[in-house]
Image (cartoon, rainbow, N blue to C red):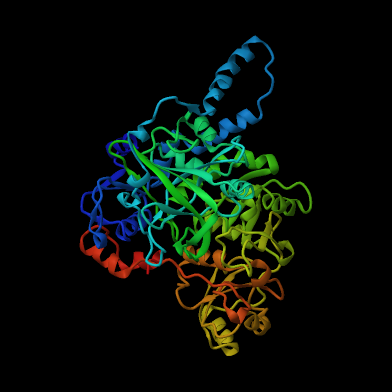
């Protein structure tokens, strides 16, 4: 970590903040603002404090380590597409013919030995300071509270190392951990995660589960922790492939789990399968709070550190955030592996304002009728892709998947109710829109064909269309139409919701000659001028089975759901910055933003 920070400072990618900043909201708010700039910088807070508790910490805090595309490329050591090309070459490797071909293959095969982590016999740098038993005090760490309604401070960049009951598999995951007190952490591994599967093994056997959490070290470790590898494959093998040198591991002091020897901080402990505690709320990467739920508790048995450690953290919330750049690396590197399931896939992209699992765009070669639908099912059946709620497929002649405006026009000229597949399946544990947790509606759109023949029968301007809609329901307070030059213009309407939007749909169906796609959002907290945040809101808020109609035109209910909709779960709130904290940071010159910036990214 120290070597990385020195390099980042030397190359102008690091911003050092010398003024004392509070771990309670201030540090997170500064990082939240910084990552929304382009380009943004890695932040090093030299003097973290907790004013309420009178604590001055003796280690700095680094935030926003994956600050932008260029910094992320430096962490990988090259462009992620180059790593993907290396993976693809390995996957298509054939037995060599002739002596020269065999000799040319030797360096590639020899390099594969670096995939396997190396276990060291001696202690690591991460164990230069060791505290066990009564010496353990998590309050010595500058653990950050990121959002006003969070249940407490959370470790947000923890590398969580676990192993199966039989000891044959080790896993590295990236899970948040809530600090309860000096020696206990809430272990938020969701039901679909590998560590949760290991936990089930220990629970069935009636045994406590060893866990070790590492913080810091090489920034590539934490990226590996969120990589969508197959079950049973140790994520640090991916580290060895990317770095072309093996991860160097040492054994934990109080359990048998192996962790990187250059980590800055290591927290060791065990999880009793019989002990749960309420974890959360937590402002999550969806831009909403995840609500209180019982999760296992980690009892800390040791904390070890290197000399002069650096505490690494991140902040999640509304996009864009540093997970945009981490996700970009994942997206590019795993393209060859995704092609093994869908060989006619050309490319795919997960826009950050679709918070990854809510929206995926894909480009493919089509060879027969229904090919795109086959792809939809393939995507929804592959690992973490199975959590994707909305998948849009285009043909090989479509614009680039990051040319958003041109791509939107291309898709809107090809969308039809017949090309929409609405089904159900598993959804991410963080999804709040579905009527029940873990399962919900999914939407697939086939836009691989030719342009549709029929557009809007009688296009009205915004003023006349609003007048017509308000004659039906005066609670429609505003509307704006986008892409009116396409066959399927999108009308987004702001609604003061006092009844189910489905009842509104029954009545506005009479306007079928003026509308092709109608999306309804809440009048409160949504700017109809801000398409970036509207995509974020809409993809978060809809369950395709409940909220989308295809006749007489496409209608989408993207409002918050409540008892009017028969929604019985608790609908979470947006993550919003604390106004007083923002004002204080602006007055002290620690952030430089204006009201338009605040509105653009929905900070308040």
Left or right relative to 551: residue 361: left
Residue 390 is situated, as x and y percent measured from the top left of the image, at: 62, 59
Left or right relative to 222: residue 140: left
Q: Is residue 397 visible?
A: no
Displayed quadrant of residue 262: top left
**Where is 566 relative to 575, above or below?**
below
Count the labels in the image: 0
Residue 328 is situated, as x and y percent measured from the top left of the image, at: 50, 46
Q: Nearer the viewer, residue 124 or 64?
A: 124
Residue 251 is situated, as x and y percent measured from the top left of the image, at: 46, 32
Q: Quadrant of the C terminus?
A: bottom left
Residue 206 is situated, as x and y percent measured from the top left of the image, at: 60, 49
Q: Quadrant of the N terminus?
A: top left
Q: Nearer the viewer, residue 64 or 123?
A: 123
Q: Is residue 250 visible?
A: yes
Identified at 63% across, 42% down, the residue is 231
Identified at 60% across, 50% down, the residue is 203
**Where is 1 relative to 482, above or below?**
above
**Where is 194 relative to 54, above or below?**
above
């Amino acid at each position: 970590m120290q070597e990385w920070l020195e390099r980042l400072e030397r190359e102008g990618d690091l911003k050092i903040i010398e003024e004392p900043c509070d771990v309670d909201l201030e540090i997170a708010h500064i990082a939240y603002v910084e990552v929304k700039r382009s380009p943004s910088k890695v932040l090093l807070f030299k003097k973290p404090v907790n004013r309420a508790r009178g604590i001055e910490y003796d280690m700095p805090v680094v935030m926003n380590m994956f600050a932008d595309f260029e910094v992320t490329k430096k962490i990988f050591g090259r462009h992620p597409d180059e790593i993907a090309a290396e993976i693809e070459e390995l996957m298509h490797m054939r037995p060599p013919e002739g002596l020269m071909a065999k000799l040319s293959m030797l360096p590639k095969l020899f390099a594969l030995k670096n995939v396997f982590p190396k276990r060291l016999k001696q202690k690591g740098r991460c164990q230069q300071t060791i505290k066990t038993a009564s010496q353990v005090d998590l309050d010595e760490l500058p653990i950050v509270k990121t959002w006003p309604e969070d249940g407490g401070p959370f470790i947000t960049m923890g590398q969580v190392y676990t192993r199966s009951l039989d000891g044959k598999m080790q896993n590295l995951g990236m899970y948040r951990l809530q600090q309860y007190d000096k020696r206990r952490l809430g272990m938020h591994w969701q039901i679909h995660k590998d560590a949760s599967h290991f936990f089930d093994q220990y629970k069935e056997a009636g045994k406590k589960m060893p866990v070790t959490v590492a913080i810091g070290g090489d920034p590539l470790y934490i990226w590996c922790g969120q990589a969508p590898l197959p079950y049973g494959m140790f994520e640090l093998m991916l580290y060895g492939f990317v770095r072309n040198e093996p991860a160097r591991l040492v054994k934990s002091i109080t359990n048998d789990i192996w962790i990187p020897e250059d980590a800055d901080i290591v927290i060791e402990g065990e999880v009793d399968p019989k002990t749960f505690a309420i974890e959360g709320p937590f402002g999550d990467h969806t831009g909403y709070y995840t609500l209180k739920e019982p999760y296992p508790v980690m009892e800390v048995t040791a904390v070890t550190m290197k000399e002069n450690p650096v505490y690494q953290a991140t902040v999640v919330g509304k996009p864009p955030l540093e997970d945009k750049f981490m996700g970009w690396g994942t997206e590019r590197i795993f393209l060859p592996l995704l092609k093994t399931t869908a060989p006619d896939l050309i490319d795919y992209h997960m826009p950050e304002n679709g918070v990854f699992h809510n929206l995926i765009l894909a480009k493919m070669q089509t060879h027969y009728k229904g090919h795109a639908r086959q792809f939809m099912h393939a995507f929804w059946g592959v690992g973490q892709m199975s959590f994707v709620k909305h998948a849009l497929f285009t043909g090989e002649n479509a614009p680039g998947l990051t040319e958003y405006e041109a791509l939107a026009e291309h898709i809107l000229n090809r969308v039809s109710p017949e090309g929409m597949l609405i089904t159900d399946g598993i959804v991410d544990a963080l999804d709040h829109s579905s009527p029940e947790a873990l399962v919900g509606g999914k939407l697939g759109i086939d836009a691989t064909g030719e342009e549709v023949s029929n557009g809007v029968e009688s296009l009205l301007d915004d003023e006349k269309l609003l007048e017509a809609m308000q004659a039906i329901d005066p609670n429609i307070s505003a509307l704006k139409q986008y892409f009116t030059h396409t066959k399927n213009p999108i009308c987004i309407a702001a609604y003061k919701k006092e009844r189910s939007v489905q009842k509104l749909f029954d009545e506005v169906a009479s306007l079928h000659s003026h509308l092709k796609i109608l999306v309804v959002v809440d009048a409160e907290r949504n700017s109809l001028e801000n398409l970036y945040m509207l995509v974020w809101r809409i993809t978060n808020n809809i369950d395709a089975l409940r909220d989308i109609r295809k006749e007489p035109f496409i209608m989408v209910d993207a409002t918050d759901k409540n008892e009017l909709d028969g929604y019985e779960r608790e609908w979470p709130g947006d993550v919003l910055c604390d106004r007083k904290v923002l004002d204080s940071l602006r007055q002290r010159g620690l952030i430089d933003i204006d009201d338009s910036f605040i509105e653009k990214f929905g900070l308040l």
